[in-house]
Amino acid sequence: MVVVPLAQREMDVAVRRNVCEPEGPNWVRIAAGGSLFAGGLLLLTGRVRAGLATAAAGTVLAAIDQQETVKSVWNALPGYIDQVQHMLGKVEETVAEVAAQRERLHAILTR
């Protein structure tokens, strides 16, 4: 039986960590925040069209910056729609029951 020694790593060699150091300010976030702020100010001052356009631009920039969040919300959207449809079905049943009871009560009172 032959024993082959395994090569040992030298402990002196530093393991490099991939640390993401910020390279400076995140300009997309700054632009998104500034656009949303400016859009809000324009809306408050009564310039509705300009405010909506600026706020829409800020929203697009924020969505570009938060792509993973947008993807997760987009993927969860069908579940939310199903829940809303189920709730609306229950509301419709309740309204139909109340209408039926109103008709019965009206029939009893008009005798």
Image: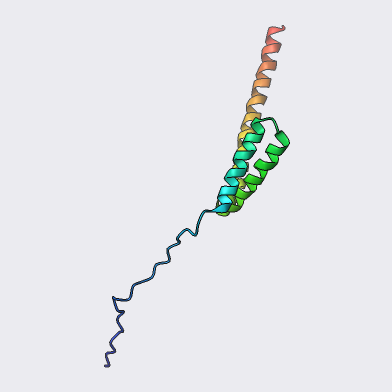
- What is the x, y in percent for residue 87? 60, 34
- What is the x, y in percent for residue 34? 59, 44
Quadrant where the N terminus is found in the figure = bottom left
Side of 56 where 2 appears, left or right: left
**Is residue 50 or residue 75 the one in the foreground?**
50
Q: Is residue 56 above or below residue 67?
A: above
- What is the x, y in percent for residue 3? 27, 90
**Is residue 20 or residue 31 the one in the foreground?**
31
Residue sitting at x 61%, y 38%: 84
Quadrant where the C terminus is found in the figure = top right
Side of 24 where 101 appears, left or right: right
Residue sitting at x 32%, y 76%: 13
Residue sitting at x 47%, y 58%: 22
Quadrant hosting residue 46: top right
Side of 47 where 8 appears, left or right: left
- What is the x, y in percent for residue 24? 50, 57
Q: In this view, does 70 lie above or below 89?
A: below
Residue sitting at x 68%, y 37%: 51
Quadrant hosting residue 16: bottom left
